[in-house]
Every structure is written in structure tokens, then in C-alpha cells.
């Protein structure tokens, strides 16, 4: 197990590169080390190995496999035949009921889009899928996860599948499109190849958008000018920046840039697979395990959380931008900073948030001698005992005037503000979760001697800050016990059963859940999980 700042031990060739269209789209942003390792499939660490299970299936892969199998099957010409075939094909997979509910219409939408495309450009035959080609004179490989079709008229089509609705193309093609078109142009055609089309299918509603339609020569020109320079940056990057990519990184368990948080979850043994978890994940899971799984599976979501949650999100956005100035928030700044901050809120949003923001001005921690480290401060670590990546992103971290390292979390509520530190500890999982960072030895980027956690609660009527010192051993034991008890069920679960209730009215994935209750009888129920 590596220590902070240490480099893991590697085996394998680091000069064999395999870059996908998705890599080109995602990897220029975020952790450079993650990207550099991802495009080197032969390079592995001897210090740690990620474990997998099948409780979170590759949904798009299943949908694509069945759709491609059925769109050329003459036994599915009628709706009844297609319905029977879908039942047979889907029964071969052990899918969660919510994922099954999404997959069935998604496959039908793919087939409808396929028929519409053939009506436009003529009969298509599947040429290949997930092609890998040699780029230039090197042995480096480019690939795209997509089916490729050819028409008799010389049109080659690459299909990008999207969980939600197809997006309209921008003025310039995105990186995925550029790489996909270039890879398609290098796959040997059966006949003459005159046009390359990249089309996106929206599986939620059967929408389709053409993202690129030009000659193979234009595809190559776009790749050389728009993408190749960025791929060099991915390959050469070495900076390690813990963040969202840690959940799937091949060295997360031994990366020297992650905090060592062994025993954070308090679980005696690893769960069924390497996972990633945050305090909000646990809160969502406790409300409904199915909701957690369906959101993690990237199924399309609906904004059903109600005005309170959206208002909380707006307030957090305003505070994050305001604190970037490193000066104390005042009543005057609440009404005058919109223009200088780039108008983070619309007039209506600002009007709804104003009373909360005025309350914050009474408890804003910035001032003389205070050094702000960051707003929305990410802390990522690895719990080797549970084999879990621990994700935390408190709203602020700063050094107080006396040198104390402070983590501050902000919550908004339309309900009563907790009466005491004990009530706040019991109400908000973020409190024991962040205290558990201190219990695991975390003291900030500078390893400060003193540390404390602050919870700021804002309501329309006022605000209050609760505080806990990191040197309180009894408090830290309570925090560890709270996290241990609340993480236990999530840590072992592989079935993710739904728990219907009043919360169904604001559930973001209710559309796909066969167990969801009707929202008609649950008027006025809102979530505060995200704020």
C-alpha cells in the first residue's frame, strides 16, 4: 500500500497506447494520471487490484447487443413478435426491475431510429462494432465503442448511444465525434466510401441527431487539427488530482494522492466489489436503495425534487462564487455582486435566495487573518479495510486566524434550525462523516495542529453555525460509530431493492421504478438530500 505522494509499482509496457473516442472526450479534464494510465491498457500496478461484481451492469452494452440482434431479425416484423423477442432476450440478463423498465423501451427506440435512418439513406448492413485501428505510422491504436453500418450508396454511419435525449450538434464537433468519424474512415470499406455520418440516438425518447456528415478526408482533417494535440496532452500527463475519476481508476487503492482512510467506514471486511461512496450516497441509499442504483447507472433523471432543493442548489452556487473573492459576505454584497460574479443567479432565483444569503452574512467566516483554501473543497481517500473510495466535498475549507484548519458545510432548510450540536449531529450525516475524516487523521493540506468542523444552517428566518473540535476523542468515536452503522447495509448490498414511500413524489428516477408510488397523493413532499 502506497503512502501519500508515493508512486505505485507498475508492470507492463507503457508505450502501447489505446485511446477511445470517450477518452478523447473526457480525459483532457480531471486527473492527468488517471487519463495517462487509462490509455495504457497493458500497464498495471502490482500494489492493488480493483474488484468487480455484476450488481451494476453495463446497461448500454446490453441494450445495444439486443437491439443489433433484433433489428435484422425477420421474426420481429409485427409488434407481437417483437414483444415476444424482447421478453426472451431480456430474460437472459439478471437486471434490476428499474433497469429492465428502462431497457425495454430503449431497445424499441433504437429499432425505431434504425428504421427512420434506413428510410432516409437506404438499406444498412452492420459492418462492424467497436473497431480498433492503427493511427498513423505508429503502433498506437484508436477505438470507438459504437456500431458501424454501411449503405450501398457509400455512406458509413457511426452510432453514439445516449441514455437520455439526443443532443443537437454544436458549431464544432465534440471530441467523441471527431475520433469516431476518423476511426470509421480507417475501417476498410466493402465498396466505395463517400460519406461518414456520426449520429446520436437518444434512447429515452427515440430522438436522433446527426453530429457529423462529411467526407473521410474531412474526418481525417478534423482529427489532426482538433483532437491529436489534445491526445498528446493525455498521454504525457502525470499530475494526480483526486476526484470523480477515482471511482474507476486502476490505481485508486494505492495512489499516493489519495488520503489514507483505512477503517473509515468501520466495516470489518471488504464488500462484494470495489466501490466509491459519499455521505450523500448513504443518505440516498437509506431513503431507497433502488434510487441509488438507478442514478448510479446513469438512467435519465427527472427534476422532481421541488423548489426547496433547487433553491438550495442556487444558494450554494452563489456562495461558492462569492467566497472566491476571499472577502467577507455583507448585506450590501448580497444585492450588488450579481454583475461582478457573472450573474450566477437569475433575478427570480436571487429573490428566492435573498433571505438565506442575508442570514449567511451574519455567519460568513471570511475576514481578517482568515485564509480560504477552497470553496467546494474535495477530499478523496481510500479505505483499504472496506476496499472503498471515500468521497467528500464540503462547501469550504479555510485556515482560521489562529491557525486552525476548518471544514465548513452549509445546509439550507425551510424547517426549524436544529437546537444544538447534538441535534445537528443526528440530523445531518455530513457532520459525523466529516468528523470521521478527522478521526482518520486528516488535518488538511498543511497538516495543521488544530482542526474543527463547522455546520452552517440557513433558513428564511435566520442562520446558525454549529462547531465541533477535532481534539474531542469521545466525539470522534461517536462519529465513527455513526458512519459504521449507517454504511453497513450499503456496503453489503447487491440487490438494491426499492422502498416505496412518500419520497417517491420527488424521486428523480421514479419514471423507471415499477414499485414507485403515485405522486398524486404525496403533494408537498420535498427532498433536502442535495442541499
Image (tube, rainbow, N blue to C red):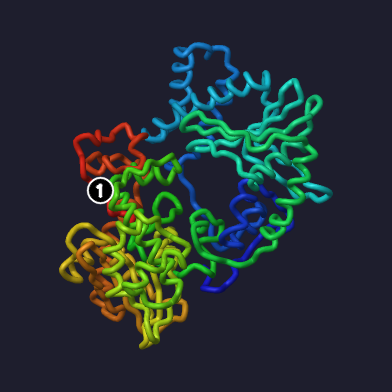
Question: How many residues crowd mark 1 within 10 Å: few (<14), some (14–19), many (20+)?
Answer: some
Residue 243, given in percent of the width and then of the height, sits at: 50, 61
Residue 361, given in percent of the width and then of the height, sits at: 30, 73
Horizontal side of residue 528 vs 272, given as left or right: left
Q: Along the line of sight, which residue is nearer the eye, 159 or 248?
A: 159
Residue 479, given in percent of the width and then of the height, sits at: 27, 68
Res 468 → quadrant: bottom left
Q: Along the line of sight, which residue is nearer the eye, 528 or 264?
A: 528
Res 393 → quadrant: bottom left
Q: Which residue is label 1 attached to? A: 526
Q: Quadrant of the C terminus?
A: bottom left
Q: Image height check: is 437 above or below 505?
A: below
Residue drawn at x 39%, y 68% as measured from the top left: 336
Report the residue that reaches farthest toward the left.
419
Residue drawn at x 37%, y 78% as measured from the top left: 366
Horizontal side of residue 55 vs 209, given as left or right: left
Residue 281, given in percent of the width and then of the height, sits at: 36, 53
Amino acid at each position: 500500500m502506497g503512502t501519500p505522494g508515493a508512486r505505485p509499482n507498475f508492470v507492463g509496457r507503457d508505450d502501447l497506447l489505446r485511446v477511445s473516442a470517450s477518452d478523447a472526450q473526457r480525459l483532457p479534464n480531471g486527473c492527468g494520471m488517471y487519463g495517462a494510465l487509462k490509455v495504457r491498457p497493458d500497464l498495471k500496478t502490482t500494489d492493488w487490484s480493483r474488484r468487480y461484481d455484476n450488481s451494476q451492469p453495463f446497461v448500454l452494452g446490453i441494450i445495444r447487443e439486443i437491439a443489433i440482434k433484433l433489428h435484422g431479425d425477420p421474426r420481429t416484423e409485427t409488434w407481437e413478435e417483437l414483444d415476444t423477442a424482447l421478453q426472451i432476450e431480456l430474460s437472459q440478463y439478471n437486471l434490476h426491475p428499474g433497469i429492465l423498465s428502462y431497457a425495454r423501451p430503449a431497445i424499441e427506440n433504437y429499432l425505431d431510429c434504425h428504421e427512420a435512418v434506413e428510410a432516409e439513406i437506404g438499406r444498412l448492413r452492420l459492418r462492424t462494432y467497436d473497431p480498433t485501428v492503427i493511427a498513423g505510422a505508429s503502433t498506437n491504436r484508436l477505438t470507438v465503442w459504437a456500431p458501424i453500418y454501411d449503405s450501398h450508396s457509400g455512406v458509413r454511419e457511426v452510432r453514439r448511444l445516449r441514455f437520455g435525449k439526443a443532443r443537437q450538434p454544436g458549431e464544432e464537433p465534440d471530441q467523441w465525434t471527431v475520433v469516431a468519424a476518423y476511426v470509421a474512415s480507417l475501417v476498410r470499406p466493402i465498396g466505395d466510401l463517400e460519406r461518414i455520418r456520426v449520429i446520436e440516438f437518444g434512447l429515452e425518447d427515440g430522438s436522433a441527431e446527426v453530429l457529423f456528415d462529411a467526407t473521410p478526408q474531412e474526418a481525417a482533417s478534423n482529427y489532426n487539427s482538433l483532437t491529436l494535440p489534445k491526445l498528446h496532452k493525455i498521454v504525457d500527463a502525470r499530475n494526480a488530482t483526486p476526484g470523480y475519476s477515482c471511482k474507476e481508476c486502476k490505481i485508486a487503492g494505492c495512489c499516493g494522492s489519495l488520503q489514507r482512510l483505512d477503517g473509515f467506514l468501520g466495516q470489518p471486511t471488504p464488500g462484494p466489489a470495489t466501490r466509491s461512496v459519499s455521505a450523500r450516497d448513504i443518505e440516498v441509499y437509506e431513503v431507497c436503495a433502488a434510487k441509488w442504483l438507478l442514478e448510479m447507472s446513469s438512467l435519465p433523471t427527472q427534476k422532481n425534487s421541488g423548489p426547496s432543493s433547487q433553491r438550495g442548489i442556487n444558494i450554494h452556487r452563489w456562495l461558492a462564487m462569492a467566497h472566491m473573492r476571499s472577502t467577507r459576505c455583507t448585506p450590501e454584497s448580497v444585492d450588488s455582486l450579481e454583475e461582478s460574479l457573472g450573474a450566477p443567479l437569475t433575478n427570480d432565483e436571487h429573490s428566492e435566495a435573498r433571505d438565506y444569503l442575508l442570514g449567511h452574512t451574519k455567519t460568513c467566516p471570511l475576514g481578517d487573518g482568515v485564509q480560504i483554501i477552497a470553496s467546494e473543497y474535495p477530499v478523496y481517500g481510500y479505505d483499504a479495510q472496506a476496499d472503498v473510495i471515500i468521497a467528500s466535498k464540503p462547501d469550504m475549507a479555510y485556515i482560521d486566524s489562529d491557525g486552525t484548519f476548518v471544514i465548513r458545510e452549509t445546509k439550507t432548510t425551510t424547517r426549524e434550525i436544529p437546537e444544538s450540536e447534538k441535534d445537528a449531529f443526528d440530523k445531518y450525516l455530513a457532520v459525523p462523516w466529516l468528523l470521521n475524516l478527522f478521526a482518520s487523521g486528516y488535518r488538511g493540506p498543511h497538516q495543521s495542529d488544530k482542526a474543527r468542523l463547522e455546520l452552517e444552517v440557513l433558513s428564511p428566518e435566520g442562520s446558525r453555525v454549529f462547531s465541533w473540535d477535532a481534539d474531542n476523542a469521545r466525539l470522534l468515536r461517536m462519529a465513527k460509530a455513526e458512519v459504521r452503522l449507517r454504511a453497513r447495509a450499503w456496503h453489503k448490498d447487491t440487490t438494491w431493492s426499492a422502498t416505496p414511500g412518500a419520497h417517491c413524489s420527488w424521486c428523480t428516477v421514479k419514471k423507471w421504478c415499477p414499485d414507485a408510488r403515485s405522486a398524486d397523493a404525496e403533494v408537498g413532499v420535498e427532498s433536502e438530500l442535495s442541499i
